Image: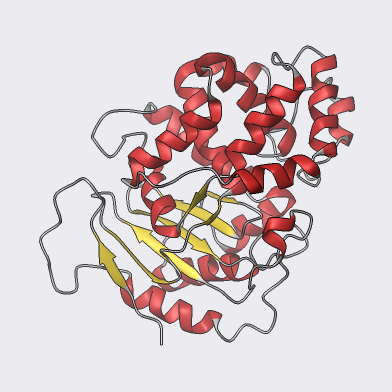
Amino acid sequence: MPHTSAAPRIGTPAPRPRPGSHRFSSVINRIAEEMNTLDDHGTPADYIPMLADADPRRFGMAVAEPDGTVYGVGDWRQPFSTQSISKVFALALALSLDGEQLWRGVGREPSGNPFNSLVQLEYENGIPRNPFINAGALVVTDRLQVLTGDAAGQVRDLLRTESGNAAIDFVPQVAASEAAFGDRNAALAHFMASYGNITLPVPALLAAYFRQCSIEASCADLALAAGFLARRGVRADGSALLTRSQAKQVNAVMLTCGTYDAAGEFAYRVGLPGKSGVGGGIIAIVPGVCTLCVWSPGLDKRGNSVAGVSALDRFTTLTGLSVF
């Protein structure tokens, strides 16, 4: 039987207990029960050996409120490989440091092609369509590495600080596994470098990118860490990571580009800004209300968690919350 529990954000005063205060507890319990009855949970990512053996029936879901209270159901405290979810945090950091200049090297349009496609780059002179396909994420990581000297470390530290969990870290075996099967990403990086859209030596860029994608975190961690997007750019400590306009930009790109070439279907079914990763996680933002993270490692053919998309679909249906 699913069971929800709540915890304050580490490092902040615990919220005063209020019976019935966790407004979505009954909703996510119901969703977890429904996810147990799915006929098809999908298949874990098999091109990354470290992810291939995950149980596709595992499921966790967390909700974080703007005040830092977080609660969840199922495997909501189980760390998993964030993979492309890390791209949201890299984008936010790069945008906070580089502003509008960042968009000179990467677009903001849906791609309509698989996340590791080479096709559009040639047509569009080495400028990737958006920061969430692999080519665009490489451009963002390249820029963040130039600006900070440690792109992956900056992403990890942002996750640690905003979640309150200092144990969030890289998994070197996952980074090595991705590097061993990283020929397509190397091709993307070399192609963009030929157009002058990559600054770093390609091997150094790939090492930073694979390291960033290897970060492990739980649903609770990611729901909390993404809270600045629900708070319109404001971090957990009250300082600003992004301007209100920049937070809107990140949420908009998540809505239109955050789930690979299924972004239109995700917007249709869920109606929230979201970002998925092939580790089976998805984060979603309800601006001003809450952030969500779901995890179930079984993926559909487009690389999105089957149960994760279904759970978020049910959440917006049951609560009536969406951006539309």
Residue at (46% x, 58% y) in the render: 293
Which quadrant holds residue 301?
A: bottom right
| Image location (x, y in percent) of residue 6 | 27, 66
| Image location (x, y in percent) of residue 147 | 53, 15
- Answer with left or right where residue 104 lies relative to residue 284: right
Q: Residue furthest left?
A: 16
Quadrant that contains the N terminus: bottom left
Q: Can residue 44 be seen in this view?
A: yes
Would you place residue 106 above or below residue 98 in this image?
below
Which quadrant holds residue 253?
A: top right
Q: According to the image, what is the colour scheme of the structure?
A: secondary structure
- Answer with left or right where residue 22 lies relative to residue 233: left
| Image location (x, y in percent) of residue 131 | 64, 33
Residue at (79% x, 35% y) in the render: 185
- Answer with left or right where residue 145 lies relative to residue 126: left
Residue at (53% x, 63% y) in the render: 295
Would you place residue 317 above or below residue 248 in this image?
below
Q: Which of 16 and 79 is in front in this view?
A: 79
Residue at (80% x, 21% y) in the render: 192
| Image location (x, y in percent) of residue 99 | 50, 17
- Answer with left or right where residue 100 lies relative to residue 12: right
Q: Nearer the viewer, residue 176 or 5?
A: 176
Q: Which of 65 and 140 is in front in this view?
A: 140
Would you place residue 314 above or below residue 51 in this image?
below
Instruction: State the count of labels.
Output: 0
Q: Nearer the viewer, residue 285 or 164?
A: 164
Q: Is residue 324 visible?
A: no
